[in-house]
Image (cartoon, helix red, strand yellow):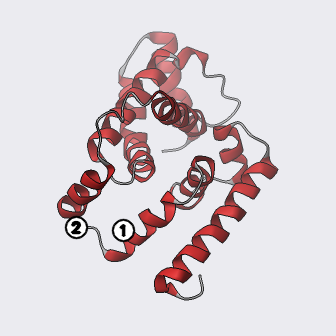
Amino acid sequence: MNKTDDLRWIAQVTLFGDNRGFDKLTQKYQSSIRRFFLNLTMGDVPLSDDLAQETFIKAYLNLKSFQGLSGFSTWLYRIAYNVFFDATRSKKVYEDINEYEIDQNQFTKNEFSAEKIDIYNALKILRKEEKTAVLLFYMEDKTHVEIARIMQCPLGTVKTYLLKAKEKLGNYLTKSGYGTV
Protein backbone atom coordinates (compact mmCIF):
# COMPACT_ATOMS: atom_id res chain seq x y z
CA MET A 1 0.00 0.00 0.00
CA ASN A 2 1.39 3.35 -1.00
CA LYS A 3 0.47 7.01 -1.30
CA THR A 4 -1.40 6.33 -4.54
CA ASP A 5 -3.70 3.96 -2.66
CA ASP A 6 -4.29 6.68 -0.06
CA LEU A 7 -5.31 9.17 -2.75
CA ARG A 8 -7.56 6.60 -4.43
CA TRP A 9 -9.31 5.84 -1.13
CA ILE A 10 -9.69 9.54 -0.34
CA ALA A 11 -11.24 10.13 -3.75
CA GLN A 12 -13.53 7.14 -3.20
CA VAL A 13 -14.90 8.84 -0.09
CA THR A 14 -14.92 12.49 -1.14
CA LEU A 15 -16.06 12.11 -4.74
CA PHE A 16 -18.28 9.03 -4.62
CA GLY A 17 -19.42 8.95 -0.99
CA ASP A 18 -18.14 5.38 -0.62
CA ASN A 19 -17.00 5.05 3.00
CA ARG A 20 -15.16 1.79 2.34
CA GLY A 21 -12.23 3.96 1.26
CA PHE A 22 -12.04 5.50 4.72
CA ASP A 23 -12.24 2.02 6.24
CA LYS A 24 -9.11 1.14 4.24
CA LEU A 25 -7.33 4.28 5.46
CA THR A 26 -8.31 3.52 9.04
CA GLN A 27 -7.05 -0.06 8.78
CA LYS A 28 -3.78 1.14 7.31
CA TYR A 29 -3.05 3.84 9.90
CA GLN A 30 -4.85 2.88 13.11
CA SER A 31 -1.99 0.84 14.59
CA SER A 32 0.59 3.57 14.10
CA ILE A 33 -1.72 6.32 15.40
CA ARG A 34 -2.60 4.24 18.47
CA ARG A 35 1.10 3.50 19.08
CA PHE A 36 1.87 7.22 18.76
CA PHE A 37 -0.75 8.04 21.41
CA LEU A 38 0.30 5.12 23.60
CA ASN A 39 3.81 6.56 23.73
CA LEU A 40 2.58 10.14 24.29
CA THR A 41 0.30 9.04 27.14
CA MET A 42 3.00 6.85 28.71
CA GLY A 43 1.10 3.62 28.21
CA ASP A 44 -2.46 4.67 29.02
CA VAL A 45 -4.35 2.30 26.69
CA PRO A 46 -7.92 3.59 27.21
CA LEU A 47 -6.84 7.20 26.76
CA SER A 48 -4.80 6.29 23.67
CA ASP A 49 -7.79 4.50 22.16
CA ASP A 50 -10.06 7.49 22.87
CA LEU A 51 -7.60 9.93 21.30
CA ALA A 52 -7.12 7.69 18.26
CA GLN A 53 -10.87 7.44 17.79
CA GLU A 54 -11.21 11.21 18.03
CA THR A 55 -8.40 11.59 15.47
CA PHE A 56 -10.13 9.37 12.93
CA ILE A 57 -13.47 11.05 13.47
CA LYS A 58 -11.89 14.46 12.85
CA ALA A 59 -10.04 13.10 9.81
CA TYR A 60 -13.27 11.73 8.37
CA LEU A 61 -15.20 14.92 8.99
CA ASN A 62 -12.45 17.03 7.41
CA LEU A 63 -11.39 14.67 4.62
CA LYS A 64 -12.62 17.08 1.94
CA SER A 65 -10.13 19.65 3.23
CA PHE A 66 -7.18 17.33 2.52
CA GLN A 67 -5.33 19.02 -0.33
CA GLY A 68 -2.58 16.50 -0.96
CA LEU A 69 0.21 19.02 -0.38
CA SER A 70 1.80 16.48 1.96
CA GLY A 71 1.15 12.79 2.41
CA PHE A 72 -2.07 11.61 4.01
CA SER A 73 -0.10 10.16 6.94
CA THR A 74 1.48 13.58 7.61
CA TRP A 75 -1.97 15.19 7.52
CA LEU A 76 -3.36 12.48 9.84
CA TYR A 77 -0.47 12.82 12.31
CA ARG A 78 -1.05 16.58 12.33
CA ILE A 79 -4.64 15.93 13.38
CA ALA A 80 -3.43 13.45 16.02
CA TYR A 81 -0.90 15.99 17.30
CA ASN A 82 -3.66 18.61 17.63
CA VAL A 83 -6.04 16.17 19.31
CA PHE A 84 -3.43 15.25 21.91
CA PHE A 85 -2.42 18.82 22.70
CA ASP A 86 -6.03 20.03 22.75
CA ALA A 87 -6.79 17.29 25.28
CA THR A 88 -3.71 18.20 27.29
CA ARG A 89 -4.48 21.92 27.26
CA SER A 90 -8.10 21.50 28.23
CA LYS A 91 -7.29 18.79 30.77
CA LYS A 92 -10.70 17.33 29.96
CA VAL A 93 -9.24 13.88 29.45
CA TYR A 94 -6.93 13.99 32.45
CA GLU A 95 -9.38 14.96 35.17
CA ASP A 96 -9.30 12.63 38.16
CA ILE A 97 -6.43 10.58 36.75
CA ASN A 98 -3.76 9.54 39.19
CA GLU A 99 -0.49 9.26 37.22
CA TYR A 100 1.08 6.89 39.77
CA GLU A 101 -1.97 4.61 39.62
CA ILE A 102 -1.87 4.55 35.82
CA ASP A 103 1.83 3.73 35.85
CA GLN A 104 1.23 0.86 38.28
CA ASN A 105 -1.77 -0.50 36.33
CA GLN A 106 0.06 -0.36 33.04
CA PHE A 107 3.11 -2.00 34.57
CA THR A 108 1.15 -5.05 35.70
CA LYS A 109 -1.18 -5.26 32.70
CA ASN A 110 1.41 -4.75 29.98
CA GLU A 111 4.36 -6.37 31.74
CA PHE A 112 6.71 -3.57 30.79
CA SER A 113 10.35 -4.40 31.02
CA ALA A 114 12.53 -2.35 33.34
CA GLU A 115 14.17 -0.76 30.30
CA LYS A 116 10.82 0.32 28.85
CA ILE A 117 9.80 1.86 32.17
CA ASP A 118 13.12 3.71 32.26
CA ILE A 119 12.51 5.02 28.72
CA TYR A 120 9.00 6.19 29.67
CA ASN A 121 10.40 7.90 32.78
CA ALA A 122 13.11 9.49 30.64
CA LEU A 123 10.47 10.77 28.19
CA LYS A 124 8.69 12.47 31.10
CA ILE A 125 11.60 14.89 31.53
CA LEU A 126 11.19 16.21 27.98
CA ARG A 127 9.08 19.18 26.98
CA LYS A 128 5.92 18.17 25.09
CA GLU A 129 7.37 19.35 21.78
CA GLU A 130 10.63 17.48 22.30
CA LYS A 131 8.82 14.27 23.25
CA THR A 132 6.55 14.54 20.22
CA ALA A 133 9.49 15.09 17.87
CA VAL A 134 11.39 12.12 19.37
CA LEU A 135 8.40 9.80 19.12
CA LEU A 136 7.62 10.83 15.55
CA PHE A 137 11.25 10.44 14.49
CA TYR A 138 12.26 7.26 16.30
CA MET A 139 8.98 5.41 16.77
CA GLU A 140 7.03 6.47 13.68
CA ASP A 141 9.98 6.83 11.27
CA LYS A 142 8.95 10.30 10.16
CA THR A 143 11.52 12.51 8.46
CA HIS A 144 12.51 15.91 9.82
CA VAL A 145 10.47 17.55 7.05
CA GLU A 146 7.37 15.48 7.88
CA ILE A 147 7.74 16.29 11.58
CA ALA A 148 8.01 19.99 10.76
CA ARG A 149 4.76 19.75 8.80
CA ILE A 150 3.01 17.77 11.53
CA MET A 151 4.13 20.12 14.29
CA GLN A 152 3.79 23.19 12.06
CA CYS A 153 7.17 24.59 12.96
CA PRO A 154 10.38 25.35 11.05
CA LEU A 155 12.70 22.50 10.11
CA GLY A 156 15.47 23.99 12.25
CA THR A 157 13.16 23.95 15.27
CA VAL A 158 12.50 20.24 14.78
CA LYS A 159 16.23 19.59 14.63
CA THR A 160 16.70 21.62 17.81
CA TYR A 161 13.92 19.68 19.58
CA LEU A 162 15.58 16.40 18.61
CA LEU A 163 19.07 17.56 19.59
CA LYS A 164 17.94 18.86 22.99
CA ALA A 165 15.86 15.75 23.60
CA LYS A 166 18.79 13.46 22.78
CA GLU A 167 21.00 15.40 25.18
CA LYS A 168 18.43 15.26 27.98
CA LEU A 169 17.68 11.58 27.38
CA GLY A 170 21.39 10.75 27.19
CA ASN A 171 22.09 12.50 30.49
CA TYR A 172 19.09 10.91 32.20
CA LEU A 173 19.87 7.40 31.00
CA THR A 174 23.56 7.76 31.86
CA LYS A 175 22.60 8.79 35.39
CA SER A 176 20.25 5.79 35.50
CA GLY A 177 23.15 3.42 34.87
CA TYR A 178 22.89 2.81 31.14
CA GLY A 179 26.37 4.11 30.37
CA THR A 180 27.09 6.23 27.34
CA VAL A 181 24.07 6.63 25.08
Query: The residue tagged with tag 2: helix, strand or loop?
Result: loop
For the point 66% across and 22% down, which residue is it? 67
* Label ID, residue 152: none
C-alpha separation, residue under disc 1 versus residue under disc 2: 10 Å
**Badge 1 is on which residue?**
117
Q: Count the labels in the image.
A: 2
- Depth check: 44 or 76 in front? 44
Disc 1, disc 2: CB below 8 Å?
no
In front of the other: 53 or 22? 53
At horizontal 46% and vertical 15% (from top left) the residue drawn is: 61
Between label 1 and label 2, give the one nearer the viewer.
Answer: 1
The amino acid at mark 2 is Glu
Specify the farthest residue to the left.
Answer: 109
Query: Is residue 103 shown above or below 89?
Result: below
Provide residue 95's location: percent of width, then percent of height. Answer: 33, 33
Q: Quadrant of residue 53?
A: top left
| Residue pointed to by mark 2 | 111
* Percent coordinates x, y for residue 159 in the rendering: 75, 57
> Which amino acid type is marked by label 1?
Ile
- Left or right: where 69 falls relative to 104: right
The image position of residue 74, as x and y in percent, is 60, 39
The quadrant in which the C terminus is found is bottom right
Location of residue 87 by image quarter = top left
Dot 1: within a 10 Å radius of its alpha carbon, few (fewer than 14), some, or many (20 or more) residues?
A: some
